[in-house]
Image: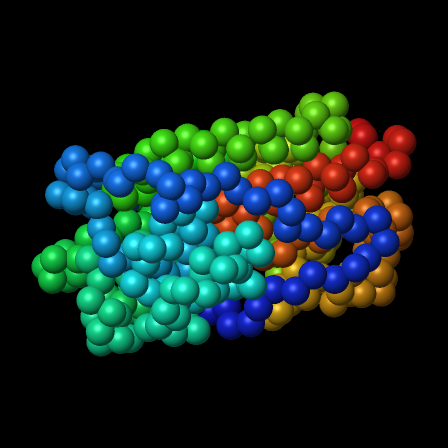
Amino acid sequence: MRVRAVRSTLSRRVAAPLSVLVVLLGACATDDPATTPPPSATPVTLTNCGTPVTVAAPPERAVTLNQPATEIMLALGLADRMAGTAYLDDAILPEHAVAYAAVPVLSDRYPAKEKLLEATPDFVYASFHSAFGDEGVGDRAALSGLGIGTYLSRAGCPKQHRPARLTVEDVFAEIRDVAAVFGVPERAEKLIADQRARIATAVARIGGARDVSVLWWDAGTDAPSVGACCGGPNMIMSAVGVGNAFGDLTGGWANTSWEAVADRDPDAIVLVDAGWDPAAAKRAFLTRHPSLKDLPAVAGQRFVVIPFSSTSAGVRVVLGVEALAAGVAQLPAGADR
């Protein structure tokens, strides 16, 4: 799992021929805290990334670190119990913008531990293991010693506790865990049902699984970083039902070579769009590269643009699935192998 702490700018969408831009439509299902019953006070005990987590009552002053964690909380209607947030990759989803505006932003990146403690949190929820590292807010055991509970996304667990192959079900399990901790399990089921329905609709538009090979290009020009067997990119490709051109490589992402890309000759190419490595620059590189420009996927502009924020394990995964499925649906006849 890559450490998000090295990322510094916001993702931006760009237009491209035969590209599919993620349109942030279709609000995630949430409950209005003002019209729903108070959360259950039943103690919750679970094991998260190998760490025991016990909460005697639903937290009232949670701090979220990283965009996926923040948006899961907002999608569950828990803004009223957020004492702070930090470290976005992109603008917050439009349907959560109003709720997010009421939550104090502690830092553009990870806050110093002192800044975190000033918010008097009773719980810290993060998406990437870097949040609890030296550049973050301190390790989980130290926070527990201060009476602060913690939760880390399954996708961000240390390697020995990470799912062997990340799936959409792992995201749904995380949503259920968080909803249980905060005493709102019914909201999780409503949100998950909405996401399942959207994924099913997206896949139905391409008629189910397709014999299509997809290169997921995340970053890098000397040695391209591509979606490998077991992380977020493969999760999205698997949900859509297409093949991962580099699914034989280990890890969530892996470095390869342009010679290998040419040899594997993918049917379509995902261009991850990020402020630090925009999709437009990736597309320009491919179309000018002497050994890549004539690949059918490049010459035919079979590109799917997906923002970085839609590739992390959170409520935006459904947007990545919808974008990839729409891109595959636009492939010309004969592109399937």
Q: Is residue 289 left or right of residue 13?
A: right
Query: Which residue is at 83% across, 38% downward?
Result: 331
In the drawing, does residue 150 fall left or right of residue 232?
left
Where residue 5 appears, as percent x and y from the top left, is 43, 67
Quadrant of image for the C terminus = top right
Q: Splitting the image into 4 quarters, where does residue 330 fall?
A: top right
Give the color scheme: rainbow, by chain, secondary structure or one colour. rainbow
Counting from the top left corner in percent of width and height, residue 312 is at 50, 50
Residue 186 appears in the figure: yes
Q: Quadrant of residue 201?
A: top right
Residue 80's place in the image compared with 46, above or below, is below
Which residue sits at x=36%, y=45%? 33
Q: Nearer the viewer, residue 248 or 282?
A: 282
Q: Give the residue displayed 22% in from the left and 62% down from the top.
A: 121
Name the foreground residue: 137 vs 72. 72
Instruction: Report the front residue among 228 and 323.
Output: 323
Residue 320 lies, in percent from the top left, at: 62, 45
In the displayed structure, 14 sits above or below 25; it is: below
Number of numbered callouts drawn: 0
* Residue found 66% across the figure and 40% down from its top: 322
In the image, 66: left or right of 178? right
| Residue 289 is at least partly visible in this image | no
